[in-house]
Image: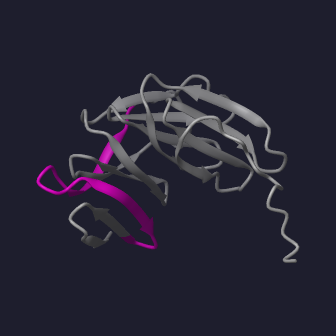
Amino acid sequence: SSGINAEYGAINHTQILNQSESTPDNKLLMSATETGALTLHSVQDTTLVSQYQHSTELTACTAVSQHLLVAGSSSGDLITLDTRNCSQPISVHRRSNYSVTSLSTHRDRVWCGQKDGECYTISPDTTLHCDTTLRCDTTLSGGDCEAIFSVVARDGVVCTSARDRIIRRYEV
């Protein structure tokens, strides 16, 4: 016996999950679902803490900080939410109508991959004031690239993967 209880901390979702991620303090688990729900569960006791319902499928999610989340949708929306009350978004922005396929946070910036091949960063308002602007800082690839399926940002390096089977590495 390994001593690991496989049922401990299990969260039973009734919807198909597209992505799950924990907040930096590892207290909350957020899940983006096919039905447009973003759920926040307590990691400690698995209770539902909060939920946001979007009008289209939520395809990706990431935590910028303990209280700031960003979710991406199949319609291209980037939704900024506060973990303390995520029933109403702080802001909703759309750069294009192409699906957001991947989100990754690195140094208070969110790297976004989209189905049209774009990979870019946004800087959400980390102070959680009612500033509803998202500033695009850097664009790594554009519409002439294959659809981005995964973006990972760590330690000054961003990697993207696409249908063309090429993993691209950028130093930022």
Residue 128 visible in rendering? no
- Horizontally, residue 166 falls left or right of residue 12, namely left
Query: What residue do we see at 66% from left, 28% from top?
Result: 85
Which residue occupies the foreground of this view, 97 or 158?
97
Residue 139 on image: x %, y %: 24, 55
In which quadrant is the N terminus drawn? bottom right
Q: Residue furthest front?
A: 1
Most common SS among magenta residues: strand
Query: What residue do we see at 64% from left, 42% from top?
Result: 67
Which residue occupies the foreground of this view, 38 or 7?
7
Residue 31, above or below 133: below
Number of numbered labels in the structure image: 0
Residue 7 on image: x %, y %: 81, 55
Query: What residue do we see at 23% from left, 51% from top?
Result: 118
Residue 3 on image: x %, y %: 88, 73
Residue 41: say if magenta.
Answer: no
* Display colour scheme: one colour
Q: Residue furthest left?
A: 144
- Horizontally, residue 165 falls left or right of residue 8, namely left
- Horizontally, residue 93 falls left or right of residue 35, namely left
Residue 145: say if magenta.
Answer: yes
In which quadrant is the C terminus drawn? bottom left
Which residue occupies the foreground of this view, 127 or 109?
109
**Quadrant position of residue 158:** bottom left
Residue 109 on image: x %, y %: 43, 53
Residue 13 visible in rendering? yes
- Horizontally, residue 38 falls left or right of residue 43, namely left
Q: Which residues are magenta?
A: 133-157
Q: Residue furthest bottom?
A: 1
